[in-house]
Image (cartoon, rainbow, N blue to C red):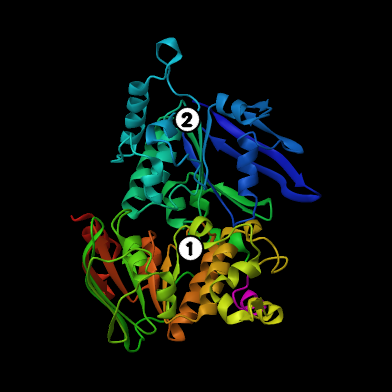
């Protein structure tokens, strides 16, 4: 157990730009210290300093009062610092057990790997999370949420004194999040010093002993939880008041989509729901429940084996994504970096990817028309980028998500499926995206919203469809749409 880890007036500069300005706070052993701030505030830079990837230009890190020199990641690990990064750091083609012991596989005689011990180590780490994942499974075969659990299990499998978690619940369902928070509380009781980075105020105020708010690389305020409240923290983060509540619900028009008895072998069965103009239907369920699989079938990525998809009172067969686009359906996927964006492409190229046919003449792109289109969405969505020719990989998560939304708005769909649209984005960007969704709905767009954030679903949706084991098991609206009711149906309890 440690007494404290102190960040003392740390400064970090990159090419003349100051990323951290006199950063300071104290992390105590046996406590959870929540670090909050918008994307670009400096949280990741600070974590990389603690991980040994960067050295501070000024200031110091002190462990139990003694200054440290964390020169590289190996030194950070030797000090007992474990970090769960926001981006998954797994090898997809290796097994769960191999990933959990990556770089430290146990050895048997003659230098051979002791696979039995590796399996046992993985099983023990996963058991801490109550995760029903086979250690022999290939990571590539797991869902995003399951992969996140493997990442967490890997960090818990070593002798950790300081645990840093960067948005660890971004890919988890409500029940998995609850389980992880419970584990973190247990680790705190065992004396670990825990630095927890999250945009979710509910998690922050459930876990925190202390909270540090940073903006533009500097500490705005560091205080105990008792001295803070969610509204104050959000205001300190963004420098203004924001609202995460949808203002107008229940106003919608004619039915645009009906799904009857939809099924896909091994994934979905008896899926039923309706969607109207100007309506948001939220899809709730545990990770692996089938929410994303429903979206993939509606968008033509996966075929259906039974049931009907009825668009504007006409039964249709959606053969592939291009067919779905022609029929007025768009999909913002849950994994924007791997499924929604060409990361090395520019903002302009990504935003117009789905409408190139409309922008062409004799095989040539009409450059002025393309530029005008992208500029209009840049202004409408308030995409923060130096230029529309900037590589999208250099943007924050919230601005990357806005580029994906711009692409689908350019298509002008009648139905837009949003799979985890605010995952990994900060409070300010989340408010902007939710405000945009509300505006689109007011204009008559029909939206299917898939989210693991139950509070987001409850605040944004007109109705909530609960999915369990590949089936729709309940539809909740009005006073029936509560966190407790959703969880009751999602878990089968």
What type of secondary structure mainly makes up the magenta span?
A: helix
Which residue occupies the extreme right position in the image? 16
Q: Which of 207 and 150 is in front in this view?
A: 150
For the C terminus, give its image quadrant: bottom left
Q: Is 171 positioned to the left or the right of 54 in the image? A: left
Q: Quadrant of residue 129?
A: top left
User: In the rendered structure, does residue 379 fall within the stretch colored magenta?
Assistant: yes
Classed neighbour count for the residue bearing mark 2: other residues with Cα under 10 Å, few (<14), some (14–19), many (≥20): some
Q: Which residue range is magenta in the image?
A: 375-383
Residue at (56%, 31%) from the top-left corner? 4
The answer to whether one can see residue 181 in this image is no
Name the front one of labels 1 and 2.
2
Q: Nearer the viewer, residue 183 or 239?
A: 183
Looking at the picture, does residue 161 appear above or below residue 46? above
Looking at the picture, does residue 202 appear above or below residue 186? below
Looking at the picture, does residue 80 appear above or below residue 288? above
Residue 125 point in image, percent of width and height? 36, 32
Say which element carries label 2. loop
Total numbered labels: 2
Residue 123 point in image, percent of width and height? 32, 31
Q: Earlier in the sequence, mark 1 or mark 2?
A: 2
Say which element carries label 1. loop
Residue 162 point in image, percent of width and height? 52, 32
Q: Name the residue under label 1.
A: 422
């Amino acid at each position: 157990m440690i007494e404290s880890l102190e960040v003392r007036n740390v400064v970090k500069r990159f090419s003349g730009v100051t990323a951290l300005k006199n950063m300071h706070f104290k992390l105590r052993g046996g406590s959870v210290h929540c670090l909050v701030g918008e994307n670009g505030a400096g949280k990741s830079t600070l974590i990389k300093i603690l991980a040994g990837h960067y050295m501070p230009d000024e200031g110091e890190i002190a462990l139990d009062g003694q200054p440290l020199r964390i020169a590289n990641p190996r030194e950070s690990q030797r000090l007992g610092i474990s970090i769960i990064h926001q981006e998954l750091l797994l090898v997809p083609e290796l097994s769960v057990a191999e990933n959990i012991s990556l770089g430290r596989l146990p050895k048997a005689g003659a230098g051979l790997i002791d696979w039995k011990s590796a399996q046992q180590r993985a099983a023990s780490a996963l058991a801490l999370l109550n995760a029903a994942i086979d250690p022999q499974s290939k990571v590539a075969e797991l869902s995003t949420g399951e992969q996140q659990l493997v990442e967490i299990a890997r960090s818990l499998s070593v002798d950790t004194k300081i645990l840093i978690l960067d948005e660890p619940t971004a890919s988890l369902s409500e029940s998995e999040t609850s389980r992880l928070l419970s584990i973190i509380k247990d680790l705190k009781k065992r004396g670990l010093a825990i630095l927890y980075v999250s945009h979710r105020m509910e998690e922050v105020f459930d876990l925190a002993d202390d909270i540090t708010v940073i903006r533009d690389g500097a500490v705005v305020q560091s205080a105990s939880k008792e001295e803070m409240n969610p509204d104050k923290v959000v205001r300190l983060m963004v420098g203004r008041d924001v609202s995460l509540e949808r203002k107008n619900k229940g106003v919608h028009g004619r039915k645009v989509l009906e799904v009857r008895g939809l099924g896909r072998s091994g994934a979905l069965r008896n899926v039923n729901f309706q969607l109207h103009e100007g309506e948001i239907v939220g899809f709730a369920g545990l990770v692996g429940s089938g929410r994303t699989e429903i979206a993939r079938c509606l968008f033509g990525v996966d075929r259906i084996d039974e049931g009907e998809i009825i668009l504007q009172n006409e039964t249709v067969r959606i053969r592939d994504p291009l067919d779905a686009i022609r029929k007025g359906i768009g999909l913002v996927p849950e994994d924007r970096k791997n499924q929604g964006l060409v990361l090395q492409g520019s903002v302009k190229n990504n935003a117009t990817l789905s409408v190139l046919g409309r922008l062409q003449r004799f095989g040539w792109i009409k450059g002025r028309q393309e530029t005008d289109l992208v500029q209009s969405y840049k202004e409408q969505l308030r995409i923060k980028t130096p230029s529309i020719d900037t590589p999208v990989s250099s943007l924050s998560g919230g601005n990357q998500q806005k580029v994906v939304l711009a692409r689908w708005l350019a298509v002008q769909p009648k139905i837009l499926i949003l799979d985890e649209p605010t995952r990994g984005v900060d409070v300010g960007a989340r408010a902007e995206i939710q405000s945009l969704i509300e505006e689109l709905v007011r204009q008559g767009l029909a939206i299917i919203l898939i989210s693991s954030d139950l509070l987001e679903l409850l605040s944004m949706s007109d109705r909530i469809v609960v999915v369990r084991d590949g089936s729709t098991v309940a539809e909740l609206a009005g006073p029936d749409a509560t966190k407790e009711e959703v969880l009751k149906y999602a878990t089968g309890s």
